[in-house]
Amino acid sequence: MVFAEQASSTKTAKDGVNTEGDFNFGRFQFDGEKKRHATRPEHALQKLEKEKEKLQQLKQADPKKAAELEEQAHWQRAVKLARGDKLRDDEQLLRKTIKRTTEQKKKSEKAWKEREQTVKEQQEQRQKKRNENIKARIESKKSKGQGGKLPLQQQKKKKQQQKQKKQKQRPGFEGKSVRAKKPANSGNNKRKS
């Protein structure tokens, strides 16, 4: 009795149900096939080329055994397709993906270098402007002490300030007006009949 229960539990484990009761939909569990495939296309291409080379050497040494291995590989491929695994055995596709990824890497590297260059240029411009401002300030301080002329920008500012002072210098009207002006037609000007 005990042996029959153990046998039935192992059968269900192979049928797609784990011993813990978890279901596995869409894939059948085959015994002893848990090999990892090459995730990177470069490695997959190298593996594929090595297998082809071995098969060529085997064809020269023992053509019958090579044919058996080739047929076995076809069956394994069919089983993987039926299981729903991704196949990475198309040489042209692998070369195409490798080419695409290298082009993307080159493109992103170029964009990164351009970004670095623009940042560097902006930094240099800011530094140059800062140095110019510092020099102008030092010169203005020197010229103020000696009674010389101010830089052009500061001269313009000073003239504007003087104009504003002249406009405000009317007796009794210093400063800005606080009261807001009334609109032309406020409605209070109507005659009473």
Image (cartoon, rainbow, N blue to C red):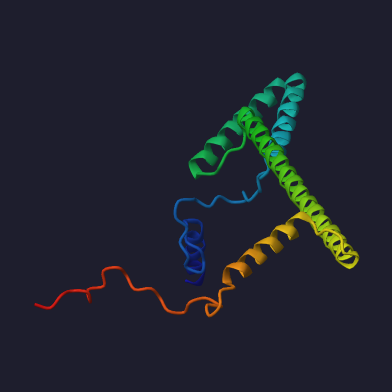
From the viewer's perspective, is 164 left or right of 181?
right
Observer-nearest of 117 and 125: 125
Where, quadrant-wise, is the C terminus in this rendering?
bottom left
From the viewer's perspective, is 37 left or right of 175?
right
Residue 175, percent from left and from top: 55, 77
Residue 43, percent from left and from top: 72, 39
Seen as rendered, the residue at the extreme left is: 193
Q: Residue at x 78, y 54 (%)?
A: 129
Identify whether 9 is placed above or below 110: below
Observer-nearest of 151 and 110: 151
Number of marks present in the image shown: 0
Residue 84, percent from left and from top: 50, 44
Identify whether 162 is placed above or below 112: below
Q: Residue at x 52, y 76 (%)?
A: 176
Seen as rendered, the residue at the extreme front is: 171
Observer-nearest of 82 and 170: 170
Q: Residue at x 53, y 80 (%)?
A: 172
From the viewer's perspective, is 63 left or right of 24?
right
Q: Tell me where residue 72 sits by quadrant.
A: top right
Observer-nearest of 174 and 143: 174
Residue 101, percent from left and from top: 66, 38
Identify whether 3 is placed above or below 115: below
Identify whether 172 is placed above or below 99: below
